């Protein structure tokens, strides 16, 4: 199995998990946050929905300097759950296509990531994608699950049963 095929398998599971979590985000609490230093729920939901675009950038760009990025940042303004899910579907489709098109040599190439002169990472594109896109998505989807729990909204079973539902192995 190719590296891209392995990455796509994990991507599909995590997009499904993220979608199932975003489906539970209430329309009426976009500004709710558990702490003054926490991201509001609506903004966090939109961040999860648009995070796959970072995977596209990693696959398509030679590197990224966050201080001088040529990419537009997606809007994180939450308007509705349906729009949030539509953004996830759009971002996931773009990321899926970029991953599917990536060859072994492309995935092995170093991908420099910096903020101006500060070098953050210079790892193979496949590792950078796992760290900065996939793991980042998993982290924020789990964070959103905590927001749901605190608001008494049933939490989906993602990697095993939650207190609210049974789990079954993703197909």
Image (cartoon, rainbow, N blue to C red):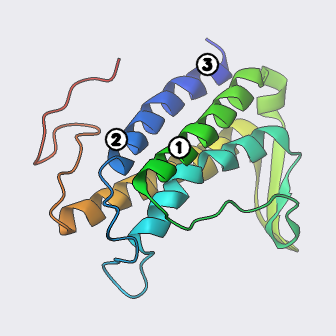
Residue 15 horizontal/vertical position (percent): 47, 37
Nearer the observer: mark 2 or 1; the answer is 1
Q: Alpha-carbon neighbours of circle 3 within 10 Å: few (<14), some, or many (≥20)?
A: few
Q: As drawn, is 154 to the left or to the right of 124?
A: left
Q: Which residue is mark 1?
A: 86
Q: Residue, x 34% and y 77% (percent of image)?
A: 32
Where 55 falls versus 26 (above or below)? Answer: above
Nearer the observer: mark 3 or 2; the answer is 2
Q: Which residue is mark 3?
A: 5
Q: Residue, x 27% and y 23% (percent of image)?
A: 169
Q: Residue, x 49% and y 65% (percent of image)?
A: 78
- C-alpha separation, residue under disc 3 versus residue under disc 2: 23 Å
Residue 50 horizontal/vertical position (percent): 59, 52
Q: Secondary structure at mark 3?
A: helix
Nearer the observer: mark 3 or 1; the answer is 1
Q: In which quadrant of the rendered image does the N terminus lie? A: top right
Between 22 and 116, the residue placed more toward the observer is 22
């Amino acid at each position: 199995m190719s590296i891209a095929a392995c990455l796509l398998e994990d991507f599909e599971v995590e997009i499904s998990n993220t979608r199932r979590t975003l489906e539970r985000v209430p329309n009426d609490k976009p500004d709710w946050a558990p702490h003054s230093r926490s991201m509001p729920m609506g903004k966090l939901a939109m961040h999860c929905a648009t995070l796959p675009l970072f995977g596209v950038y990693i696959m398509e760009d030679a590197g990224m300097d966050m201080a001088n990025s040529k990419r537009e940042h997606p809007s994180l303004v939450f308007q509705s759950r349906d729009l949030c899910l539509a953004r996830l579907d759009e971002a996931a489709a773009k990321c899926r296509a970029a991953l599917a098109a990536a060859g072994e040599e492309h995935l092995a190439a170093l991908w420099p990531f910096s903020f101006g002169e500060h070098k953050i990472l210079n790892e193979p594109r496949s590792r950078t994608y796992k760290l900065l896109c996939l793991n980042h998505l998993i982290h924020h989807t789990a964070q959103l699950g905590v927001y749901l729990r605190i608001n008494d909204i049933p939490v989906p079973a993602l990697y095993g049963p939650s207190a609210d539902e049974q789990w079954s192995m993703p197909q």
